[in-house]
Amino acid sequence: MPSTALKPTTTAHAITIDGLRKIPVGAPKPQAYRFTFTAGETLEASSRIQLVGGKFRGVFESWSLQASTLDESQITLVQAPPKDFNALMDARMNERSNQHYRLLVLELKETLPAGESLGWTLAYTPLDLAPLPTWIACELKTPDDKAYRPVGERFAFGTVPGAAARLEVRVSAHPDKRGRHRGSVFVTDAWLNPADTFSGQVMLESEGVSGLPACVELHRGVGHFSYRQTGDIVRIHATTEEQGFSAVSNPSLKAPANGTSIYFGAIHFHSAFSDDGDRNPEDAFAYARDVLNLDVVGLTDHSPIDFWTQTCEANEAFWDEGRFITLPSWEWSTDDGHANLYLKTPEVAAGPACCLEGPHPGSSEWPDDVLLIPHHTNTQPPEINPETGEPYWRTYDWSLRNPRIRAVEMCQTRGSFEMDVIDPEWDIRDEGFGASVADALKMGYRLGFVGGTDNHAGFPTRSGTGKEPVPRYIGMTAFMAPELTRSAIWDALNTGQTYATSGVPIILLVNVSFAGDTQVEVSAEIHGTAPIEIAQIIVNGEVAASIESGQLDVTWKQTLTVPSGASVYLRLRQTDGYMAWSSPRWSK
């Protein structure tokens, strides 16, 4: 389909692009493309040619014009490809139901006779996320036209996964109602993208299990299996014979403790329903469920007023009680901070149209079946809004208290917001704002902890930008609930029965019990995806106790004296840098 509702030009104007193709992640960067426009009939001076691009994260800081390839005697450069956030906002074409961006605008200085051509070269640096399909199109506006008209058809291109480079195994932390653990095994490229051209067998083995298949056939890089667990703690070992790939799964436990299971989810990411997002929700949900073997997702697009019906439809299509839970959710972004809203059911009257009624989510009244979770609370963007002279958004305003603020996002692609002091060991990158998690707790907030991603390209628990030097998973929430249902998962969020990890399914079982007002006993059972480097008990924002381990499985019990009303939680860091934080408990 053309990029506007107007009919294409009726004359034989043509646009060709030399070399436009699917780009394997890891291919040399940037990719250069030669554009050639050929006039089908004489075009007058002042006619304009523009390139528009589909909704994709690659627009921002990814396109550049090789100015030397323009014939300046023929063409005036009206708009170069956007190179910063402000330019990107200026280039956005404001059609909410068909969002795309203006990449380049050229104007003829003189008449272009029929049959003659002009050309230019654009370079494109793709993201390391794949598959990420998109398109580019050409449009023309003559001095007699009131609007641009398409020239030719859209050119489809985008990223595809690179070569197979690694193997990964994910298993459910606890068995389902049938007593079986569910697992996925998949091959990725070096940037964590599923290598969907890979097919073959993966051998599986483990002690303490029954019914585990000896091998799994992978189709498009992914395979699935299940097993019954007889041992207390199990990790599945996987290998491929031909490629020599090997991997060990995250840990799984034999049975729920006190009837409570652990379920892992991604509850902060974006799709094409956000102004600055990409990929459709269905692709994002399928990736979370079928590849990453997650239990829960919450799609949090930026105030998707025009897409709320489609958002709810996607949620309901993938909602599968006992297997995969979708939480109706969206993000309200304001000058005074950002927060995600989670609805207990899609029928709750708290959808994104509410953002038209107030300046900030914390200043609005919400029913009891809505949760408000602030995120990236202690940072703000470097980009300045030219209209206000201020950043496009600021740190979260904790002074706007609201009873529906029941949790806070501890970590995401911008790092951890635990404290207000830079600390590389705990990935805390900002300081001096006074809006950290510790600051909120000091103000009397009682909050559970969650982990988010803030990926804007439809890849849950993946890097938010696709440009990190070291590919890593980012932000995951663990829910402790009696069953895998939408109601039970929402209740876990509502009551602080969650913990945050920085991206992988670490098992963290923490019990905090108080004897009187000041004595507290903290007992922890930790099962890592890598050896546990250090674990610490944090009381009122300070390290009260610490242990170092180097083991995959750690148990720890510690008795402390704490002040009245103190917040107490445990945090840990693995030797591979991944971290986890239990939700706080409070003394009397």
Image: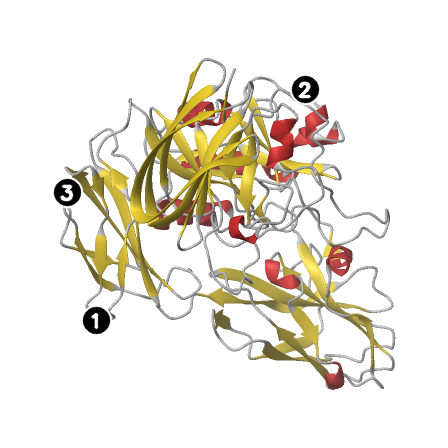
The earlier-in-sequence mark between 1 and 2 is: 1
Where residue 365 is drawn, which disc sits there? Answer: 2
Frontmost of labels 1 and 3 is: 3
Asked if labels 2 and 3 touch by Cβ distance under 8 angstroms, the answer is no
Q: CA distance from mark 3 to mark 2?
A: 50 Å
Is residue 584 at all visible to an observer of this figure?
yes
Which residue: 33% across, 64% down?
Answer: 166
Residue at label 3? 209
Q: Which mark is residue 388?
A: none
Q: Residues within 10 Å of mark 3 (few under 14, many from 20)?
A: some
Lower sequence index among marks 3 and 2: 3
The amino acid on which the numbered mark 1 sits, given as a three-letter code, is: Glu
Vertical placement of 160 versus 27: above or below? above
Left or right of 199? Residue 160 is right
The structure residue drawn at horizontal position 39% and vertical position 65%, both measured from the top left corner, is: 189
Q: Which label was assigned to residue 242?
A: 1
> Which label lies toward us, 3 or 2?
3
Q: Could you say where residue 585 lies in the image, as x and y percent from the top left?
A: 48, 24
Quick check: can you spot residue 582?
A: no
587 sits left or right of 429 in the view: left
Where's residue 529, x and y in %?
Answer: 34, 49
Is 259 left, or right, of 34 in this rendering? Answer: left
Question: Residue 323, image x and y in percent?
Answer: 33, 35
